[in-house]
Image (spheres, rainbow, N blue to C red):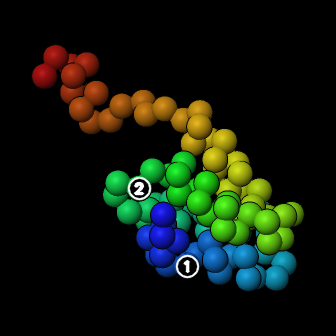
Amino acid sequence: MDVTLIDRKGLIREAYKIDGITVGECRSIFLDWALNLPDGVENRAAIEQLLTIYGDTPHDHPMTAVLRAGLDDAQTAKRRGGRKARLEGKGQ
């Protein structure tokens, strides 16, 4: 998978370049990244690719911890429904 497809704005790349970045700042960047992931790209696969590219440099970077947490969440997250599920529950 092409990194420019999954990190179009370079948010994750730039987070690794910021000296003294905090976990909270990394979470905010991650959320922005996740909200801008292109349609059809699975977040789990994208996070795995980002960890392959950036995860070892440096290993203890706060963004690496956030990506790993995102990967754990992506493995356990299940869609709970949406508009269609709500409408079906009302008999429509």
Residue 50 in the image: x percent, y percent? 62, 63
The residue sitting at the left extreme is 92
- Residue wearing tag 1: 10
Residue in the image at 21% along x and 27% along y? 87
Depth check: give the residue in front, 27 or 77: 77
For label 2, the crowd category at 10 Å Cα-Cα, with few meaning under 14, some 14 to 19 and many 20 or more, is few
- In space, the residues marked 2 and 1 are separated at their CA atoms by 16 Å
Residue 65 seen by the camera: yes
| Residue type highlighted by circle 2 | Val
Q: Label 1, secondary structure: give it.
A: loop
Occupied quadrant, residue 18? bottom right
Residue 5 in the image: x percent, y percent? 44, 70
Label 2 or label 1, whichever comes before in sequence order: 1
Residue 28 seen by the camera: no
Does 19 sit left or right of 42 as displayed? right
For label 1, the crowd category at 10 Å Cα-Cα, with few meaning under 14, some 14 to 19 and many 20 or more, is few
Residue in the image at 41% along x and 56% along y? 41
- Residue wearing tag 2: 41
Q: Please tell me whether mark 2 or mark 1 is closer to you in this view.
A: 2
Q: In what quadrant of the picture does the C terminus appear?
A: top left
Does 63 sit left or right of 36 as displayed? right
